[in-house]
Image: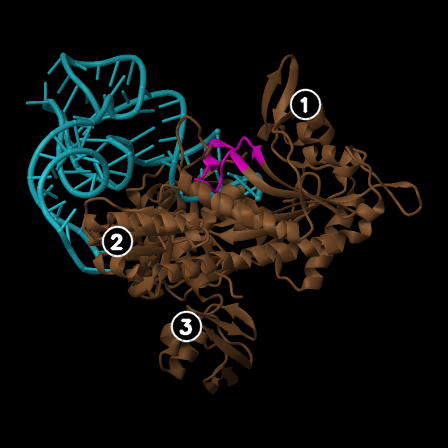
RNA sequence: GCCGGUGUAGCUCAGUGGUAGAGCAGCGCAUUCGUAAUGCGCAGGCCAAGGGUUCAAGUCCCUUCACCGGCUCCA
């Protein structure tokens, strides 16, 4: 008999070879119903695993770390089986679980239409009802290659060939469906409760655009119908926050066929942008930056010198002036180089922090454009820091602090990535490892959690990226800190050291917001259009109850306007309820109702967007209060 | 750029080969109202663009453009 300890349930004795599932059944209670897999001595295994030695077991349920992943991975296998049942002639790609769901990539002979999803879902239900056990089998590399080769599963064959020599090759099968898979999986298909196929998309095999494009079906699965409903409801809510929808509804910006990827800012969107810039200038002045501006169009020779001509050309726009070739800038750095070169610097002048709100143009592929998140013309809140080599760590640290300060003001949480040398790059291996090492050191020293993004650096240097999430959970790169030893070299930058000799400065490229466009898009989604007072395009609207108060309402408006408050007057011939409704929908922070009583008292009845009616308040008092709130930018102190 | 989908009034959407519709928004008139929609009326369209099939095309076919969901790429 084996002695098995079940975490939280005590010790059990079972004969050797008993499966975990059987043991859990013996243990009784909901544990056997809720178990998805088990941790056997620390590693996650199938419930169908037979026990061979004394061990301790920790049950994995849907809410545990790998629970949902295993659950949905099984769902993806069931989907693949359903697809094979329905459309025999189909080759399988890969089908992992992802955040909130799963997908499977297929190569169909005839492309699949979205109306087919329902049919596949129906077939999945059948398979679930059959409650087929998922059997794990291990096979030798040759056997596996033969097995999948005979079935014409070319992609699986490729996967097997790519496995390391010492890999255990395992398959999971349910019914007559067998898939290459490391597992673990649910014990049987019947353990799946609700599955839902969500959408259909194209995806390159192995994410490589030179390889065939497969069709990817996305879906999700939950152990309870209610959880699925909640998930779908959450997605619906998230769609309402989509900045493209709110941008139109709140009249912030627009796009036109005449300029795909080129945003048009409307007056209200422009207010947000200017407020962000103003805040940015204040903070950067405080952090020791000076501001410059460089031209949008510059001569080809500059781009050849910077390396953009060679490394970035496919993203650039070109034009001719007289007979000369010019490029529209895709980055601000070469301009900043020329600014630096216009002067003479001593080591005492460094670090020199030159900031630039620089509008750049990049030719992004048509399919990648996405509202304000991904555009072809955007303004970077750029800066180039020229410094002594020994100042690198302190400067990187300073920028990280600045980024953190900014994101905290807006209540964003972010994740950090370190991107290393890409294939297409300039500079020696030594330079790259020195620069990458420096960034790595600062991140480690600050104790920041970060992910390494192999090969994702800029062509001139490695970078630390800051990513924010949109309403649907997609992440977007915003802030970035790029360390660059290349440009100073290319442009022969120098400073005079204490020794009276010329030395080469190091340089950082960095943005905090990233791009104004993207950051605004994220703000719209983050706040659901209800901007904090200091950013709100319209901060207050005066609502007279009848025409008799129009004169007074105008006085109120004038008085607030004189104080620099963005205030509208709604003097249309509508009922108050109508005007309030509209102001609420426009997410205007304050509604100031001006009726007979208020006029007599020189007050306004204040209605706040979130809290509702706050009752009457003398106009002067409201004025002081709103001004204070604007100045504080919603921050404490 | 690639795969799939979608394009009808400012917005949201009906319209499945036989005379372009609704709600909201807009405009006009009436109404003068106390915290999320007052009533009546009037306008508003080269059905994304171009080509084709047909006696007849918003509707079927082709091409292009834009957008949406992904992939790739990136701030």
Rendered hue of chain B is cyan
**Please, which chain is the residue tagged with disc 2 on?**
A
Q: Which mark is residue A35?
A: 3
Relative to B14, is A13 above or below? below
Pick whichever, A436 or A305, lies toward us: A305
Label 1 crowd bin: few (<14), some (14–19), many (20+), radius 10 Å: some
Left/right of residue A542 with respect to residue A61 in the rendered view:
left
Pick whichever, A399 or A241, lies toward us: A399
Q: Write down the residue under mark 2.
A: A580
Residue A494 placement: quadrant: top right
Residue reaching furthest to the right? A499
Pick whichever, A526 or A424, lies toward us: A526
Q: Are marks 2 and 3 in contact (CB under 8 Å)?
A: no
Tell me which segment is drawn in magenta: A359-378
Which circle's residue, 3 or 1, is located before the other in the chain?
Answer: 3
Q: Secondary structure at mark 2?
A: helix
Q: Is residue A366 magenta?
A: yes
Structural distance between the alpha carbons of marks 1 and 2 = 56 Å
**Please, which chain is the residue tagged with disc 3 on?**
A
Residue at 71%, 63% (x, y): give it. A445
Label 3 crowd bin: few (<14), some (14–19), many (20+), radius 10 Å: many
Q: Which mark is residue A300?
A: 1
x and y percentages locating residue A625 in the rendered image: 42, 61
Which circle's residue, 2 or 3, is located before the other in the chain?
Answer: 3
Which circle's residue, 1 or 2, is located before the other in the chain?
Answer: 1
x and y percentages locating residue A199 in the rendered image: 36, 46
Kindly indicate whether the residues beneath marks 1 and 2 are on one polypeptide chain: yes
Q: Which mark's residue is nearer the viewer, 1 or 2?
A: 2
**Please, which chain is the residue tagged with disc 1 on?**
A
């Amino acid at each position: 008999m084996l002695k098995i300890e079940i975490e939280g349930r005590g010790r059990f004795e079972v004969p050797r070879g008993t499966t975990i599932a059987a043991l859990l059944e013996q243990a009784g209670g909901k544990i056997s119903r809720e178990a998805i897999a088990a941790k056997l001595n620390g590693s996650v295994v199938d419930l169908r695993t037979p026990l061979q030695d004394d061990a301790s077991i920790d049950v994995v349920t849907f809410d545990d770390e790998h629970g949902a992943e295993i659950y949905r991975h099984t769902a993806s296998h069931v989907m693949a089986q359903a697809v094979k049942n329905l459309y025999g002639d189909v080759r399988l790609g890969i089908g992992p679980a992802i955040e909130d769901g799963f997908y499977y990539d297929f190569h169909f002979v005839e492309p699949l239409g979205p109306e087919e999803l329902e049919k596949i879902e129906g077939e999945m239900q059948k398979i679930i009802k059959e409650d087929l056990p998922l059997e794990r089998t291990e096979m030798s590399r040759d056997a596996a290659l033969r097995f999948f080769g005979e079935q014409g599963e070319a992609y699986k064959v490729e996967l097997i060939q790519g496995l390391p020599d010492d890999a255990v090759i395992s398959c999971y099968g349910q019914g007559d469906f067998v898939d290459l898979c490391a597992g673990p999986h649910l014990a049987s298909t019947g353990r799946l409760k609700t599955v839902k196929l969500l959408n259909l998309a194209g995806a390159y095999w192995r994410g490589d655009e030179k390889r065939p494009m497969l069709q990817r079906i996305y879906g999700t699965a939950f152990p309870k119908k209610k959880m699925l409903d909640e998930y779908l409801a959450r997605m619906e809510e998230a769609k309402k926050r989509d900045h493209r929808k709110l941008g139109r509804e709140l009249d912030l910006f627009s796009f036109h066929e005449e300029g795909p990827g080129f945003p048009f800012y409307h007056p209200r969107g422009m207010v947000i942008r200017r407020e962000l810039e103003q805040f940015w200038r204040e903070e950067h002045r405080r952090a020791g930056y000076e501001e410059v501006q460089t031209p949008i169009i510059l001569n080809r020779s500059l781009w050849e010198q910077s390396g953009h001509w060679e490394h970035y050309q496919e993203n650039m726009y070109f034009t001719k002036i007289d007979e000369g070739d010019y490029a529209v800038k895709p980055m601000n750095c070469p301009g900043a180089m020329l600014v630096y070169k216009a002067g003479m610097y001593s080591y005492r002048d460094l670090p020199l922090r030159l900031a630039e709100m620089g509008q750049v143009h990049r030719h992004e592929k048509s399919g990648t454009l996405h509202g304000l998140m991904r555009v072809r013309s955007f303004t970077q809140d750029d800066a180039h820091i020229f410094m002594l080599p020994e100042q690198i760590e302190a400067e990187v640290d300073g920028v990280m602090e600045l980024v953190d300060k900014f994101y905290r003001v807006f209540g964003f949480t972010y994740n950090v990535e370190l991107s290393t040398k890409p294939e297409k790059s300039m500079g020696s291996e030594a330079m790259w490892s020195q620069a990458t090492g420096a960034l790595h050191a600062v991140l480690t020293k600050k104790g920041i959690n970060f992910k390494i993004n192999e090969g994702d650096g800029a062509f001139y240097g490695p970078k630390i990226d800051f990513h924010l999430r949109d309403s649907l959970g997609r992440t977007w790169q915003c802030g970035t800190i790029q360390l660059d030893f290349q440009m100073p070299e290319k442009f022969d930058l120098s400073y005079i050291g204490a020794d009276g000799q010329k030395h080469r400065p190091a340089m950082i490229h960095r943005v905090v917001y990233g791009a104004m466009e993207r950051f605004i898009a994220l703000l719209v989604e983050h706040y659901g259009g209800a901007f904090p007072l200091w950013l709100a395009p319209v901060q207050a609207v005066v609502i007279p109850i009848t025409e008799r108060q129009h004169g007074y309402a105008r006085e109120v408006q004038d008085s607030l306007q004189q104080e620099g408050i963005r205030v509208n007057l709604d003097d249309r011939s509508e009922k108050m309820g109508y005007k309030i409704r509209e102001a609420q929908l426009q997410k205007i922070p304050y509604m100031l109702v001006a009726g007979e009583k208020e006029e007599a008292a020189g007050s306004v009845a204040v209605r706040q967007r979130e809290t509702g009616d706050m009752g009457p308040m003398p106009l002067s008092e409201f004025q002081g209060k709103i001004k204070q709130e604007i100045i504080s930018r919603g921050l404490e102190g």
